[in-house]
Amino acid sequence: MSSTTPAHEAAQRPKRLPEIVADQLQEYILSNGLKAGDRLPTEPALTEMYEVSRQVVREAARLLEQRGVVEIRAGRGMSVADVSVDGVHDIYRLFLRFKPENFEDLLATRLILEPGTAALAATQRSDEDLTRMRETLTASKNLAADAFAEHLALDLEFHRHVTDACNNPFLIALSTPINESLREVYAEPIAYLSSLPQTHTEHETILEAIAARDPEAARTATLAHLGRVRDEAQKLIPDAG
């Protein structure tokens, strides 16, 4: 019996012609420095360029649309899309909805990613970044104690401001879909709200370390905060674990 897994078999299979054309067209976009909104050659031009049928070009275009690389509109043809993290967010969201037990894996990813992000924010942050963090934390402290959705939104917004302070688009692209997924999977308002004072204190400690430009303190404070959240995962999402 072969020990080859389905995933391995998929990785080893030869690419279909539409996939090859999609890869070549994607490289065409990159090598020519095309930007969001730039129109691509027409379908007849692409069939001639790659010496394939119109059906192959259409399927290649659909593949690129699924990747979020292009937009296809009737009467306008194909143009370069504004690449965003929305597609990644959708994958994370579906992954957690179908398998909530993977929530702990998501938290483990945060424990790897966010302490380093906070450390970098401590060296890169601006005064405006600090102002946004403080305003978000203050807004949460001033909310009614039972305003679950608003508190959660501000909680995640605080973490987003920390990531934004890094001025690193790759970290932002990695962190944003994780935070957006958390917004949808926290299922127990009472458990979340009961630990809110502790969350405020932990956010304050992270903020103070970033304000002091102390990367190790920011890293340590973030590890402590996310470690506590991980330990409470079962309360936040009963189906997790």
Image: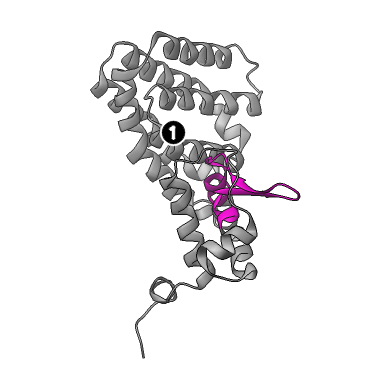
Q: Nearer the viewer, residue 126 or 24?
A: 24
Q: Which kind of residue does numbered mark 1 sit on?
A: Ile
159 to 141, vertically: above or below: below
Q: Nearer the viewer, residue 55 or 180?
A: 55
213 in the magenta segment:
no
Residue depicted at x 44% and y 44%:
32
132 to 26, vertically: above or below: above
**Which residue, as the protein is rendered here, is positioned at the far right?**
75
**Left or right: 173, with 100 as reference point:** left
**Left or right: 221, with 235 as reference point:** left
The spot of residue 113 in percent (x, y) is 35, 38
158 to 239, vertically: above or below: above
The spot of residue 83 in percent (x, y) is 53, 41
**Which residue, as the protein is rendered here, is positioned at the far bottom?**
1
**Residue tagged by mark 1?**
172
Q: Nearer the viewer, residue 3 or 57?
A: 57
86 in the magenta segment:
yes
109 to 23, vertically: above or below: above
* Residue numbers of the magenta segment: 64-92
Mark 1 secondary-structure assignment: helix
The spot of residue 13 in percent (x, y) is 42, 76
- Please tell me how crowded label 1 is: few (under 14), some (14-19), or many (20+) other residues with Cα within 10 Å: some
Residue depicted at x 42% and y 50%:
105
The spot of residue 212 in percent (x, y) is 29, 11
Residue depicted at x 50% and y 73%:
16
